Image (cartoon, rainbow, N blue to C red):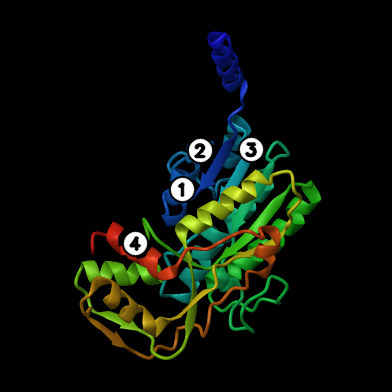
Amino acid sequence: MKLKKDQHILSKMKKRIIEKVFISGSSGFIGRNLYNFLKKEYLILKPSRNIIDLRNKKKLNSYLKQNKPNFIIHLASSTNFKDKPDEEKKNQYDNTYKTTLNIAKTINKECSLVIFFGSIEEYGNIKYPFKENYKPQPISEYGKYKLKALKEVQKILNKKNINYLWVRPSLTFGKYDNKERFLGHIIHSIKNKNKIEISPGTKKRDYLYIEDLCKIIRLIIKRKNEKFNYVLNISSQNYVPLSRIPSIIERILKKKIDYKLIKRKDVQTNLLNSNSKLKKLFPKIKFSNFYKCLKKTLKYEKLI
């Protein structure tokens, strides 16, 4: 009797269709974490740029037709900012705007949901905390091209009747963080014994732990049958002033670090998301403690 029951369970497992998730930008900070988080439940498609260049619409179209992903998570964009304005505009056009449009243009209806990663930088210097219905006024080329891409995505996918969600996460940190990101830069500077320069004053940032972000993306995927087609902030509302970060790290490490407070013109006033819309979508959602997660990140980097 038990043997028959076991065979029945095995048969059901074999019949279960494993859904496929295509992650663009899978080698980056968020992409690597999402891959590790989702790989036990889904078949992850994560081709390198050598296999598929997202700027090449024809090759991308061929790849998606051949592999037929059930979900697409579009992370790929350029955060390697250029010093010269003309070079930066071309960089963002090619690697942020064009790649996003190519994804939107080549998706077919076999895909249940497309999650595009926008940016908190789309909002710019406006009233905070930022709400999704506010009119953005981006300052950086990165923020401008993200917003420009969103407007085109809305036109294309609403016309094609394909379900999508444009997420704007707060400043994410955690395992695999890179030195181009604020907290990642500080941590890498400590590891390499470089002096850290921090903006003084009360300018705040909204920090989101990477595991919390991954859990939310998984929850969104699970609700694939729900019609989205809107912008969604992903925020923990862990608001911390930039100038306090070094002292928090010193408290965790129980030692002094080499830093200096320097006034900079290029620091945006406050980057703070509202998460009221997110909490309506997931009323029971809870976020991790910033201090504990920063400690975990420092431990991963072998600084503790």
Q: Secondary structure at mark 3?
A: loop
In the picture, the disc for residue 44 is 2
- Give the Cα separation between the discs numbered 4 and 1: 20 Å
Badge number at residue 297: 4
Q: Quadrant of residue 216?
A: bottom right
User: Closer to the camera, 283 or 66?
Assistant: 283
Identified at 51% across, 53% down, the residue is 214
Earlier in the chain: of badge 1 and badge 3, it is 1
The one of 287 and 85 positioned closer to us in this rendering: 287
Residues marked 1 and 2 touching at CB (< 8 Å): yes
**Label 2 vs label 4: CA separation?**
25 Å
**Mark 2 Cα within 10 Å, few/some/many (few <14, many 20+)?**
many
Q: Earlier in the sequence, mark 3 or mark 4?
A: 3
Q: Position of residue 220 (x, y in %)?
A: 63, 50
Q: Crowding at label 4, few (<14), some or many (≥20) Cα neighbours within 10 Å?
A: many
**Amino acid marked by disc 1:** Ser
Q: Which residue is mark 1?
A: 26
Q: Which amino acid does the dot numbered 2 rest on?
A: Ile
Give the Cα separation between the discs numbered 1 and 2.
10 Å
Q: Residue at x 76, y 57 (%)?
A: 155
Residue labelled with disc 3: 70
Nearer the observer: mark 4 or 1; the answer is: 4
Whether residue 76 is visible: no
Q: Earlier in the sequence, mark 2 or mark 3?
A: 2
State the CA–CA distance, disc 3 to disc 4: 32 Å
Front: mark 2 or 4: 4
| Total marks in image | 4
Residue at 64 percent across and 79 percent down: it is: 137
Nearer-N-terminus badge (1/2): 1
Q: Secondary structure at mark 4?
A: helix
Give me the residue at 64% from left, 67% from top: 147
